[in-house]
Image (cartoon, rainbow, N blue to C red):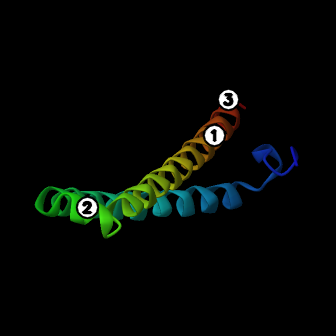
Amino acid sequence: MKRVFNLHRYHWLAVLTLSGVSFVGFAYSSYSLFHLSMANIAFLRKHGASAIMEGALLQLFEIFIGGCFALVCYLGFKICETELVSRYHRWADR
């Protein structure tokens, strides 16, 4: 399993593609999370306890899970970015 996560062994184009996919996942989930959380807060403020009975707390938990997904995508992007910058510096120092 450790060999799968070793980015040194992959072609730079594969690492760049993974970086792009991670960035798109982060951007989409962050945008969705902002709108969902604002709507959830407005719903809770307007309806109070009946909103909780209708499932607002479940939706809040789903928003939290979405935030964790956004964090994983961001970390994946930063790891790929670091690997690509490191490869560039090694290439430039030759």
Q: Nearer the viewer, residue 30 or 9?
A: 30
In the image, taking residue 36 as reference, residue 79 lies left or right, namely right
Q: Tell me which amino acid carries mark 1.
A: Tyr
Q: Position of residue 82 (x, y in %)?
A: 60, 38
Q: Residue furthest left?
A: 46
Q: Position of residue 92 (x, y in %)?
A: 64, 35
Q: Tell me which amino acid carries mark 2.
A: Asn
Residue sitting at 14 percent across and 56 percent down?
A: 45
Using the image, determine if residue 27 lies above or below residue 81. Answer: below
CA gap between label 3 and label 2 equals: 52 Å
Q: Nearer the viewer, residue 41 or 53?
A: 53
Q: Earlier in the sequence, mark 3 or mark 1?
A: 1
Q: Which residue position holds label 2?
A: 40
For the residue labelled by badge 1, is the local secondary structure a helix, a strand or a loop? helix
Q: How would you rate the neighbour count of disc 1 (Cα within 10 Å): few for under 14, some for 14-19, many for 20 or more?
A: few
CA gap between label 1 and label 2 equals: 44 Å
For the residue labelled by badge 2, is the local secondary structure a helix, a strand or a loop? helix
Q: Nearer the viewer, residue 42 or 29?
A: 42
Using the image, determine if residue 14 lies above or below residue 71. Answer: below
Residue 51 disc label:
none
Q: How would you rate the neighbour count of disc 3 (Cα within 10 Å): few for under 14, some for 14-19, many for 20 or more?
A: few
Q: Which residue position holds label 1?
A: 88
Q: Which residue position holds label 3?
A: 93
